[in-house]
Image (cartoon, helix red, strand yellow):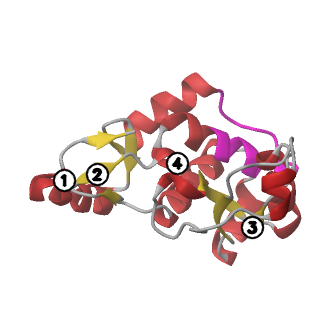
Amino acid sequence: MYWDEAVDQEQVILGMSHWARCVPTHFSQANQGLSGTLYKQHSTYKQITGTVIAKQDLIISAYKPNGGLEERFRLEAGTAEGAWDFVRQHLKQLPVVVRKGDRLEVVAERQRHLLYDRMVAYHLQRGASVPLGAAEFYRGLEQRFTGREGMYFLPEQVLEYDRARLQGGGGGSN
């Protein structure tokens, strides 16, 4: 998706994701150098001449939750188990390792506040009550998932991240 207007882009995207039943996984500016970003050599006419036009292009990654998650959510909507099922499925969709040069980058969507934000949005978009407050959610993350440098991983993912760190990736940076 490409967005080039000066409006609250994240709100528009979240509204569109509600309509399409997609879950955003990453927002970045095109010049941040993350893989899969849009590189343009020239600005658009509106970017050059406009005073309230976004000067950088926003890149959005999103996925459509699988049918199994949607079906389970119908049965578990508004429950803590439904929330943790969503988080497990969401973590499966996120990149485990992102490199910038010889360094590992922090995958922002793996940070606790953004995991909570996505869980809340997922519930609200489907008309379900949010079963966990932030403090309870953060405690549950610590109990259910492995944390590294402010990011959370499934058991099979943390091994991949640890291997990348040992192979010279160093700590995450922001």
The earlier-in-sequence mark between 3 and 4 is: 3
State the residue position of label 1.
169
Of residue 46 and residue 152, the one placed in the foreground of this image is 46
Q: Report x, y in % for residue 16.
A: 85, 61
Kindly report which numbered mark, 1 or 4, lies closer to the viewer in this rendering: 1
* Mark 1 residue type: Gly
Residue receiving disc 3: 2
Q: In the rendering, which numbered label is found on residue 109?
A: 4
Q: Amino acid at mark 4?
A: Glu
- Magenta range: 117-133
Circle 2 residue: 104
Residue 14: x %, y % from top left:
80, 52
One can see residue 118 in this view: yes
Residue nearer the viewer, 46 or 105? 46
Give the answer, above or below, for where 135 lies relative to 141: above
Q: Is residue 13 visible?
A: no
Q: CA distance from mark 2 to mark 1?
A: 5 Å
Estimate the spatial distance between the alpha carbons at disc 3 and disc 4, rounded to whole Å.
20 Å
Spot occupied by residue 50 in the image (x, y as percentages of width and height): 87, 48
N-term mark: 2 or 3: 3
Within 10 Å of disc 1 (Cα), the crowding (few <14, some 14-19, many 20+) is: many
At 33% from the left and 40% from the top, the residue drawn is 173
Q: Nearer the viewer, mark 1 or mark 3?
A: 3
Please tell me how crowded label 4 is: few (under 14), some (14-19), or many (20+) other residues with Cα within 10 Å. Answer: many
Mark 4 falls on what kind of element?
Answer: helix
Picture layout, residue 11 above or below residue 17: above
Q: Earlier in the sequence, mark 2 or mark 1?
A: 2
Give the residue type that dot 3 points to: Tyr
> How far apart are labels 2 and 4 at the CA level?
15 Å
2 and 1 marks in contact (CB < 8 Å): yes
Secondary structure of residue under mark 1: helix
